Image (spheres, rainbow, N blue to C red):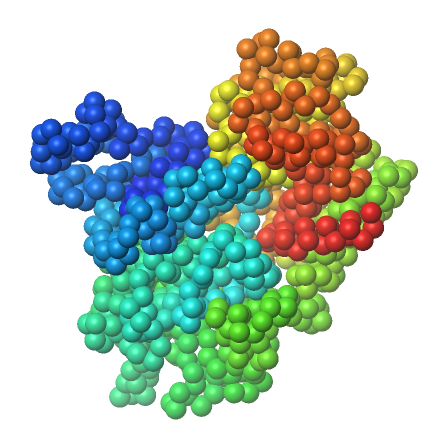
Amino acid sequence: MAISSEHQTSKQLAPFATDASIALVGMPGVGKSTLALITAKTLGYRFVDTDRLIESALGMAPFLFMKQYSIQEYRQREYTIISEMLGKSDNHCIISCGSAIHEYPPTHDLMVQFSKLHPVIHILCDEDRIVQYLRAADVETVHRLCLERHASYRECSNFEFFNLTAPRRQGDLKVDGPSRFFLFLKNTEADFIRFLKTVALRKHDENTIRLIPPEYGRFSYSITLKFPMQSLLQDANEDASHVTFADMVLGADCIEVVVDAIAIRDRKLQTGAIAKFVASIRRSAPRPIMYTVSMGSQNLDSHENRELYFELLDYGIRIGASYLNVDLTLFFYRVLEADGSVSYQKKSYISELISLLNASPLLMTNVFTLASTTEIAFCQKVIGTWYNDSSSEIRSAASWWDGPDPQEIIDGALMFCKVIRLSIKAVALEDNYAALSFSHRWTQYVQDRGSVLCVYNLGPLGRLSKILNPILSPVVASYRAQSFSLDRISEYVDTSIPTRDVSAYEAQRALHDLGILPKLSFYMFGGPLSTISLSPYLSNVAFRALGLPHVHSVYESLNPDELVQLTKREDIGGISIFSPYKEHAAKLSDTISDHARIIGSVNTIVPIRESRSLKVTGMHGENTDWIGLYNSILMHLSPVNSVSKKTTALIIGAGGSARAAIYSCIRLGIENIFLYNRTLSKAESIARYFNQQSPLSLAPVTSMPSSQTSTEKQFTSTIPSRVHEIKEVQTMISSDIIVRPRKFTVHVVSSLESVSSVSDLGFELPTVIVSAIPAHASFPLSWFSHHTGGVFLELYYGSLTSIMSSKMRSLQQRGWIHVNGLKVLPEMAASQLELWLKRAAPRSVMAESLLRYWEEHS
């Protein structure tokens, strides 16, 4: 082999600790303070605003100080104050830095040094918002100022975040009313927390199902969205744009964003436009981002091209792309030796690539020797892609796959790639068999060296190899995107290829037709009332949308022992449990999660299969009701009501849903939970049960075997068979949830007629209220008197309206959000599906279908 795959030792996983403080820098009006404040509340960090800190330390406004003394004196005092603050804010702080930190070199240098051990994030937004925030008349001056300052901000920052919902003016949020205020902040909070999960290794996310990384999934797909050169997004907050993206990527496990480097240079576009595009995708269709820089037909031999390519490649790291896709053809060239053998030589500037990768704090490549840690799942990863278009020296794809070329490329890519993608244009049907044969021979070789191999052919005749390739097969836009105009879609996807390429939907259908993807049976097992459950309906909607052949049906029974017979079916895909058998299901499960054990019931059964024969060897019991409630509360609880030590909750009911609601509130970090039930003794029994649980028993689940301490190792161990065994099923529900309180108490409320049972004890009124009774219910509005509002979940599925829904309309202006059962149900069903399928559920499709169903049948 001409290229060795030596492994170098390097730095630790990240240059900053997972509890390191985070600093935000950027222009005035980009939303630094808002982001810092809501993130501090969410993470439980201390909020620090340097502008307020400086004014407090000076005892007067900065402009008055400069008027009384001098600008130089002010800058020196500013430097001293910020230096002392940074020295005391090493961890657990979110720092909003003033926009003028770059103006005094010593202060700027302070931030540069701080960024070496802490995440420093450059915040961006649309320039017109900055213009309006500054009330500037000269737009061109503001534009030039942004360009000048951006360079300085990037020098002292590690990452960049585009704030889609930065307010145009300070008063905008209030002018638009409480509902608009909530929408602005909630979207911003969700975007930024998701961003921090990747770039700052923060263990917090609203999705409590730990999905398998696409490179370890069974038949995972990536869809390509090209950066829109014709016209950039006019308004990233338009609902239509969100629907377009969500529909286009339906069924995809990863989104590849392709940036045309030459077009960006020729049109003199700023990189911030790329950050905005990626932020828009993340908001509407949360998926891992694969970032690709395309040089078109040009290479990197010229210094100008290299500078452009590496600048844009580095930008993919800065904006927190999950995968950095490197075009291997730019760094290796084919050499035909005198004896007829073939070798691939490195181009001299590959050292620049290695330096860029080594400089990144988060890139996970084979260059690094990584410690064994579950945080490895949050790292960025390098994908190396080689595409050969069957040039003149290669007569067919089959001869290429059987020759020495791909082997040489693999050895070169192993230097720095976590995923290696090889492809060539097929010219005959047999080329597909050659690609499959090559993949079979070399997959284990690549896995033994810590990487993953992806092999397929391109072109109309290469469709079969794409369908059979199990990892990150490229697919085209979903069939649902056809409802949009071709002109609109063509900005983001290549509309010339759908006629000769496959979508994720078509690939799944083809795998079933080929006998590779068997039809599985899913059941809703329950008593006489199980027929009213809409979970099977939602599951079948999701199956159809994803192109899966599975069927979810109701199994009504008066005999709980019949559940055993269902678990023994060879085609069993999963079982959802309905009343009154949730406790019985817990007893029959071979293993049971800590979540289900504490709640005391199982509503989801996941089959455990033998790794090679696929035979069912056991059943794992889980409770996903609490996940649906947890997500629903988190999604609708405004940032101003983020959980703190003072937060309280009220749960109404004493059934299984009430127990799940209590558990979700504990997971959210609520220390004081009030419980009411018409039968007082049942409420007291539940309260006594939870109060006897120790805080340690409710800590994040860490049931992973000691020999598999890394999520990376856990998933890697299943690659040969692509089947997830018992240890994986047990850890599918993520422990990436912050549980701040070390103690909690469930208090029993004897009557809802008065709130005195809460206020007399010195507690604040609840900001989270859950009515967990399956019937119309009404109670006094005095419980909705908290001055900042809150969220009210009503688990009633009987109709689109209820007694309380009409009452809640008058409370919307006071900050209360009403979430009915038809909004919670899709979240619960999606959690079950993700446990069964190990991939993201089509939440928007499920929610839309459920709403249409009720409009037609109510």
Residue farthest to the front? Answer: 137
Looking at the image, is 228 positioned above or below residue 185?
below
Nearer to the camera, 259 or 485: 485
Above or below: residue 193 compared with residue 753: below
Q: Which residue is found at the position 35% from the left and 30% from the top? A: 47
Q: Using the image, determine if residue 438 lies above or below residue 84.
A: below
The foreground one among 294 and 554 is 294
Where is residue 103? Give x, y as percent.
Answer: 16, 44
- Residue 857 is situated, as x and y percent measured from the top left of the image, at 83, 50
Q: Splitting the image into 4 quarters, where does residue 95 fall?
A: top left
Q: Residue at x 86, y 39 (%)?
A: 529
Residue 605 shown left or right of residue 458 in the figure: right
Between residues 331 and 748, which one lies in front from this camera angle?
748
665 lies left or right of 578: left
- Quadrant containing the N terminus in the rendered view: bottom left
- Picture coordinates of residue 493 (x, y %)? 50, 71
Using the rendered image of the protein, determine whether residue 804 is visible from the camera's viewpoint.
yes
Total labels: the figure holds: 0
Judge whether residue 449 can be spotted in this image.
no
Is 320 on the left or on the right of 336, as rendered?
Answer: right
Residue 710 is situated, as x and y percent measured from the top left of the image, at: 46, 44
Nearer to the camera, 581 or 442:
581
Looking at the image, the residue that sits furthest to the top is: 760
Residue drawn at (40%, 73%) of the image: 386
Q: Residue at x 61, y 44 (%)?
A: 729
Left or right: 651 with respect to 74?
Answer: right
From the viewer's perspective, is residue 350 above or below residue 760?
A: below
